[in-house]
Amino acid sequence: MEPIEYQHAIEAILFALGEPVTTERLCHALDTDWDTVETACRALAADYEARDAGIRLACLEDSWQLTSHARWGDTVRSLLARQKPDKLSPAALETLTIVAYFQPVTRVYIDQVRGVDSSHSLALLLDRELVAPCGSLDAPGRPNLYRTTPAFLRSFGLSSLDDLPPLPEQETEETDETEGGDAP
């Protein structure tokens, strides 16, 4: 197959599936090696970008997915007119932040960090497919572990978890004492 044919085949596969597809799965489908698929995907993504097309080829960790261009997000959203509100509550965002930065985590861990029950927020994030179960902790009761999903990466415009901004550093007690304490 010629390089352009790999691009066309990948485009057809991604369009037909409508979900992220791993590079490995594309290799199997096209009966070729990793480098050929990666090169074809990057060339296809560059082509969409160069043409300022209405779609983009997004790399989500080790997967690829066709997405609409951000510029057309409002237009696409208005057409889809989802039943659920797009915005997450502060509690759901707080829960999502904990999962994103400390994954894999249990619901009990989330509850401890937040100081309140997180069942509702976690259920909402599971329903929106922003988090997913990823096994269970080897502890009594075998509680579920949760992680973020490719939908999380897509929703926040990230290629991988490495793109998350760093957490702000916690102030130490020494800093609090020297800056705001009663100095002699």
Image (cartoon, helix red, strand yellow):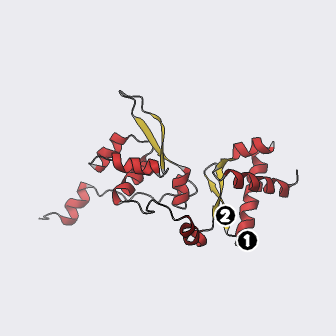
Left or right: residue 58 versus residue 26 is left
Residue 164 % position (x, y): 49, 57
Q: Is residue 159 above or below residue 144?
A: below
Q: Residue at x 50, y 62 (%)?
A: 82
Label 2's element? Answer: strand
Q: Residue at x 76, y 54 (%)?
A: 12
Residue 125 % position (x, y): 43, 51
Q: Nearer the viewer, mark 1 or mark 2?
A: 2
How packed mark 1 is, by other alpha carbons closer than 10 Å (few <14, some 14-19, many 20 or more), is: few
Q: Amino acid at mark 2?
A: Arg
- State if disc 2 and disc 1 touch (CB < 8 Å): no
Q: Residue at x 45, y 45 (%)?
A: 103
Residue 102 % position (x, y): 42, 47
Q: Which of the 4 image quarters holds residue 87?
A: bottom left
State the quadrant of the C terminus: bottom left
Q: Residue at x 47, y 60 (%)?
A: 83
Label 1's element? Answer: helix
Query: Which residue, given by chain and number where applicable, does mark 2 sit on?
Result: 56
